[in-house]
Image (tube, rainbow, N blue to C red):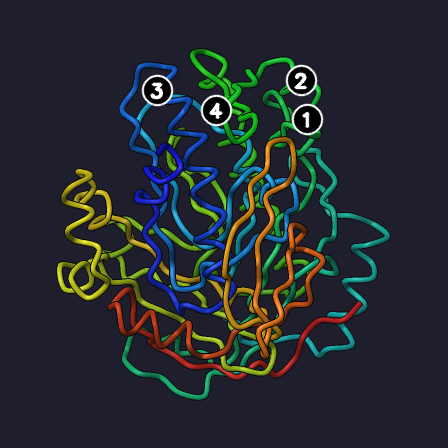
Amino acid sequence: MELERAREHCFLSGVGDVGEQLCAANMPFGIAKIQHVQRQLGLPMDASFVGAPDATVTRNAARWGQGFGYGGRIQWTGEFSVLDIKSNHCGMIAVALHDPPPPAEMEERARLLVKHPLVVDDVEVEFDLTESNHFLDICQIRERYDDAAPKTDTLAIIHSSGHEHRERSPKGPGIYWDASEELRRMMETRETPWGPLHVLTGDRAREFYAAYRWCEDFSLRRREALARALLGPLDVIVNRTHQGQLAMNDAILGCYSFDDTDLASGQLFPLTLSPTLPAYLVRPLPNLDAAALDQTGFRPRAERLGLVDRLSKANLLPHGGGYSFAQYERVTGVVAEPGQPVAFELEKPGGVVDRVSDVRAAAYGYRGDEVRQRMLDLRLGEPVARAEITYILRV
């Protein structure tokens, strides 16, 4: 019953492929855990997840194992922190270049940064553009759709986060509970029917959130410093987290969120789909609007749960294409046995079914233009410029 309640609090309306189906199958476990803790604390059991068009799995095995997917916004009532979401300030900076350095010079600058790291606030900056799906792309604008597009022809987009403060920070504990001894001493381990949830309450939650905010500010500054060191003179278009906390009880995982200030200023956000597809600068639109709530069929359920206001102010944009699993056709079932990792039954062409718990080990690819199209269908945002990726930094 509690798991079904949590499932009702998950709203996904993306591209509908196996990546999103896996996210939809796993997220109820994380939401159920938060709702269970809400009940323990005497709070409304209203934790919810709203998916963005790029909702999919997370490559962080610990986060996935705790019941959290990727590509959406998690919100709940109550001033307590949920550490299993593992907010880590990952994000992107998009910049306009007037005189970009040649590739050989960027590569030499990168090699020097590996040997002689930048220092920001007396902290050595780890060069992380060679890890996982982090990158530096040089892009040429091929089409402008209105006057909001940058006037320069060359853009650079950097995706990075860094590991500098996962164990400790100058302002308090580290940001990862499974890496920070101090954070483990502060946290509470709350037992739920689906496994433990690691939380902070009261003054400890407020102390952690203050430290987290400093670490996020550091991450924004390190990203800009890295961009300037690699690229030289530039104009910042946007430098924004897409994996972090908006408040103590409000987190985004693998998507952008924006506010009225962003709308008023005409803030643009980058959308990168794959190395072979165009990148876009996108202007956000307030969402989910009334038409989208009807189009997705969310309205009756949101009204019954009292979540219409939360959904209508989700204000989400996809940050990328997200992972896809072309070898599978659909998710056919979920197996949750006590003391065992949750397993997902995935059907291949021909009806063969694999049972997979470690989704990180499964072969994956990246989605294509369907994510951008879904963003347009739901009126979440509109592109103002299309750019071709002409160079990817290799070190």
Is mark 3 in CB contact (under 8 Å) with mark 4? no
Q: Position of residue 354 (x, y in %)?
A: 64, 62
| Mark seen at residue 168 | 1
Identify residue for label 4: 210
| Mark seen at residue 182 | 2
Asked whether the viewer can see residue 356, the reply is yes
Is mark 3 in CB contact (under 8 Å) with mark 2? no
Please tell me which residue is depicted at 62% across the width and 20% down the height of the picture: 183
* Amino acid on which disc 1 is placed: Arg
User: Mark 4 or 2 closer to N-term?
Assistant: 2
Question: Badge 3, how many Cα within 10 Å: few under 14, some, many 20+?
Answer: few
| Mark seen at residue 357 | none
* Amino acid on which disc 3 is placed: Arg
Nearer the viewer's eye, disc 3 or disc 2? 3
Please tell me which residue is depicted at 38% across the width and 46% down the height of the picture: 73
| Mark seen at residue 39 | 3
Please tell me which residue is depicted at 83% across the width and 50% down the height of the picture: 116
Q: Toward which corner of the image does residue 6 lie, by quadrant?
A: top left
Looking at the rendered image, the quarter that the N terminus falls into is top left
User: Mark 4 or 1 closer to N-term?
Assistant: 1
